[in-house]
């Protein structure tokens, strides 16, 4: 009984983070929900001992990224056209945030996930490298290229002097 309560607390605590990572990777809410469910099932059946909460969160994000990659490689995914658009799925307090979100969602997945983990989940470059399975240099390059693409996409949206 105590174990069930702990599992429910973990699911409530981390499902939103897992969903946001999956949504950033896949751009489709329904697919992100499926991935979230798969990851939570893996958490429930996991017998791994975590050293602390940050280790558990790191593991969950790593599993989420791997699930997303597997999903994108699947035969079904490559041969089906999605019917719903992601753009209306996230509410924003200001239109500017919506513009930034749209620009980030237009980035290729490798850039999009790096931006999300760095700016929203506040992981370091080395932690992102571990999560995504690439080198720190590759993460730095992806962030640099993503920033350049975002700057180009958002020209005219920002009120800067450049």
Image: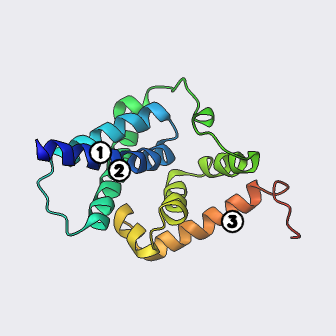
Quadrant of residue 35 in the image?
top left
The C terminus lies in which quarter of the figure? bottom right
Q: Secondary structure at mark 2?
A: helix
Quadrant of residue 50 in the image?
bottom left
Q: Position of residue 116 (x, y in %)?
A: 52, 58
159 relative to 137, above or below? above
Q: Which residue is mark 2?
A: 14
Compared across the picture, whether 71 is left or right of 30 comes to: left
62 relative to 98, above or below? below
Q: Which residue is mark 1?
A: 11
Query: Dot 2: few (<14), some (14–19), or many (≥20) neighbours within 10 Å?
Result: some
Q: Position of residue 118 (x, y in %)?
A: 51, 66
Q: Secondary structure at mark 1?
A: helix
Who is closer to the viewer here, 144 or 51? 51
Q: Residue at x 41, y 32 (%)?
A: 77
> Residues under labels 2 and 1: Cα distance?
5 Å
> Residues under labels 2 and 3: Cα distance?
31 Å
Q: Residue at x 36, y 34 (%)?
A: 34
Display colour scheme: rainbow
1 vs 3, front mark: 1
Query: Dot 3: few (<14), some (14–19), or many (≥20) neighbours within 10 Å?
Result: few
- The single residue placed furthest to the top in the displayed view is 83
Q: Secondary structure at mark 3?
A: helix
Q: Position of residue 72 (x, y in %)?
A: 40, 41
Asked if the residue at tag 3 contacts the one at tag 2, i.e. Cβ–Cβ closer than 8 Å, the answer is no
Q: Residue at x 47, y 47 (%)?
A: 20
Asked if the residue at tag 1 contacts the one at tag 2, i.e. Cβ–Cβ closer than 8 Å, the answer is yes
Compared across the picture, whether 141 is left or right of 36 comes to: right
> Residues under labels 1 and 3: Cα distance?
36 Å
Q: Which residue is mark 3?
A: 148
Q: Residue at x 42, y 46 (%)?
A: 16
Compared across the picture, whether 71 is left or right of 24 comes to: left
């Amino acid at each position: 009984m105590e174990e069930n309560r702990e599992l429910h607390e973990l699911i409530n605590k981390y499902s939103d983070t897992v969903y946001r990572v999956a949504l950033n990777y896949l751009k489709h809410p329904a697919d992100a929900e499926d991935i979230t469910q798969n990851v939570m099932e893996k958490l429930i059946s996991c017998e791994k001992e975590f050293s602390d909460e940050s280790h558990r969160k790191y593991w969950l994000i790593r599993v989420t990224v791997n699930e997303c990659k597997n999903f994108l490689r699947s035969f079904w995914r490559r041969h089906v056209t999605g019917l719903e658009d992601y753009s209306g799925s996230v509410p924003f307090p200001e239109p500017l945030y919506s513009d930034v979100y749209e620009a980030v969602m237009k980035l290729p997945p490798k850039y999009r996930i790096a931006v999300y983990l760095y700016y929203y989940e506040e992981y370091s470059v080395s932690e992102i490298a571990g999560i995504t399975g690439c080198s720190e240099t590759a993460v730095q390059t992806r962030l640099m290229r993503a920033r350049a693409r975002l700057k180009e996409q958002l020209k005219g949206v920002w009120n800067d002097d450049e």
